[in-house]
Amino acid sequence: MIKKTTYIVTSVLLALLVYFIFSYLQYSQKREDLAITKGDKVTKALKNDVASILEKVMVSGREIATIMETQTLTSDAINLLLKERSIAINEILGITVAFEPNQYNDQHLYAPYYDKKADSIFQLEKFYDYTDATLETTTWYVKIRDGGEQWVEPYFGQVVQALITDYGIPFYNPDGSMKGMVSMTISLKGFTELIHSLSLGKTGFGFVTSKKGTVLAHPVSAYAGLKTLQQLQTEQIHPELRKAYSNILKGETGFVSFNIEEKKQKTRFYYDIVPASQWGIGVLFFDDDLLGADRETKQRLIQIAITGSLVLFCFLGLYFNRDYLSTQEVWILSLFGSFILLANVFYIGYLEHISKDHNTITESPPVIDNTTLSSIINAENLKAKKNNAANPIVIPTGVYIDELGFMDSYNVNISGSVWQKYPKTILDDITVGFQFPQASPFAESVYIEEIFREETNKHVLISYNFRLTAKLNFVYRKYPFDKRNLNLEIRPLNHNDNLFFTPDLDSYKVTNPSQKSGLSSNISLSGNRILESYFSYQYLDYGTTFGLKNNTHVSKVPELYFNINMKRVLINAFVTYLIPIFVTLIMMFIMVYASNKSHELISDSGIVQGMTAFFFVLVFSHIDLRKNIETTELIYMEYFYFITYIMIVLSTHNLIMYTRPNTSIFDYKNNLVVKAIFWPTFLILVLTVSLFLFY
């Protein structure tokens, strides 16, 4: 009956193991498909929005061209037509009707341009000869005259003093000769706002390029009209992106995925082509933005490991399924069982050690390049525009840490330098400086001293030295597998100044987090290993206006953080705390193992005294742990002590009962059952605690 039951249980567990493996593979594929679907959806939304704008512009331009071909309009009628059509389309910056020489009222040149922003008509022929192909600013006309209806490459408009692009449509005389052309002018700034109105995650970004690869819109505003996709391709270090950029230039669509080591994230880049203009579109996402943190993968791997272990136990049970087991076979079962349990404990600890702890995941991934930073700035500008507020004033801010040390579990001593670059025009209108909101609430916890000021043409560089005792909210529940993120917040002194502190990335030679930029190489933290340093943002809502009438400066504010991520050096914790535990367990096991009724037994008082000695050894070690890790919650390492206390009580009970006559379960082969289950019992309890905390 027992053998039959074991077969049934083994079959069920095997089926469950197959299910968990299949479910894990399916989940991984589903997560991959979901990321592809979400990324593709946003890319298509951007493509459709761009196409919609272009279609409106093209249709309106063709209608104007038809009117100019079929009707003879006065200058006032032309001006009114241009104004009405410009106002009808939000994205239009202005419209031009330009005639060929001597094609309008015997005038040599005639080209009225309606500027929607100025609400005025400008006669372009008064500024320059737009038919002169040798001038750089005449592309909008010459390209259409020579090549027909098309979108022209972006250029700097002399009249509007901005980077623009045009859609040109020629119109003709009845004899087929060209009479003139209609030029629909679009500001490139509008496309950047369009990109950032989409959900690209916290640091994802998109861009639009012309057919020839000229950047029309990009998070780095300096790229628009000046950079080409070919140049970005040359500068790009990731071969997957270089290939994707090449495919955009070829007019292809698709996506690539790759890992950005600096940000510790899987990255996806989608690219597409707008049919109406053959413009290229690129959109980059991070998996955490698309899907959120992936805790479920770890849980599914643990499920597979535990179920696989149970299957192995069943196989062992089937192999040794006899009414009588020799002493050697019992010890083989005990050894294999202990090994399997220990392997599971190590595996769960390993998964936890390599996983991203929720305490080190900030609201934004690391800000390590100007593209990412520009995306965040543009998003804040867009938010300000929606709230009818002024754009925040960008203040580049740098940090360098000279010394770092822990006072206790929560207070950290930090010293170093901070520098900021303020526009010269605002110095008299704002409160210069910064604050550390995490300063410990006692006197002399923070000291900030201005060292020097240096003026340049555009800004004033102000440098400070600081010493700080910061009180940080570390969580020690998973010690020694906890990851501590020393996130130093840097906040403006006055909320009403509308300042936006940003990382001064240009002041660092490297911004790769693993290179620990902003940290002195002399910093050494005993028992810890510094993994990386980087800037990031957390989005805070203070829940109060601080008495200000304008609360847009205190609602979901991106606060600048300088992060230092560190892990425990596990060998330190294991040597300090686990060695006393395992030495105690080994000594206890020796006492239990050595018990034999054929020899003189230790008295009850001797057993109690011996176990009490073990208990006090552990208590002092436990107290030392509590002194080093001051926290109100139980930590993972403490459970080892509690489990060992339980083992002391159980072993004491066993040895005392073993001295009594007629204790059949203990008398069997000189207490063999208890001896054999000693280590499996301890490891089962440890595995249970590990699952409780880490699953």
Image (cartoon, grey):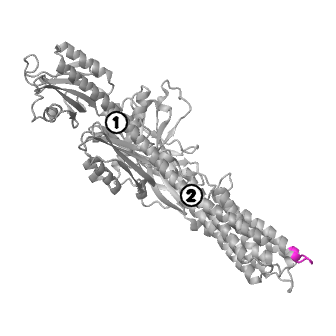
**Where does the N terminus fall, quadrant-wise?**
bottom right
Left or right: 28, with 457 as reference point: right
Q: Is residue 431 visible?
A: no
Badge 2 density bin: few <14, some 14–19, many ≥20, Cα 10 Å: some
**Residue sitting at 69 percent across and 69 percent down?**
581
Nearest the eye: 540 or 202: 202
Residue bearing the label numbered 2? 24
Q: Quadrant of the C terminus?
A: bottom right
* Residue at image coords 11%, 19%: 104
Instruction: Compute the Cα span from label 2 to label 1.
Output: 40 Å
Question: Percent from the top left, x then y, of residue 199?
Answer: 44, 39
Q: Which residue is mark 1?
A: 192
Query: In x, y percent, where is residue 430?
Result: 40, 31
Residue 113 point in image, percent of width and height = 20, 22
Q: Amino acid at mark 1?
A: Thr
Q: Inspect the magenta stretch and tell me whether residue 658 lies in it.
A: yes
SS type, badge 1: helix
Front residue of 453/523: it is 523
Does dot 2 land on a helix, a strand or a loop? Answer: helix
> Is residue 670 positioned above or below 572 on the image?
below
Residue lying at the far right of the rendered structure? 661
Task: Tell me which label, 2 or 1, sits earlier in the chain.
Answer: 2
Q: Which mark is residue 212?
A: none
User: Which is closer to the viewer, label 2 or label 1?
Assistant: 2
Q: Amino acid at mark 2?
A: Tyr
Magenta segment boundaries in residue numbering: 656-664
In the rendered image, the vertical position of residue 352 relative to residue 455, given as above or below: below
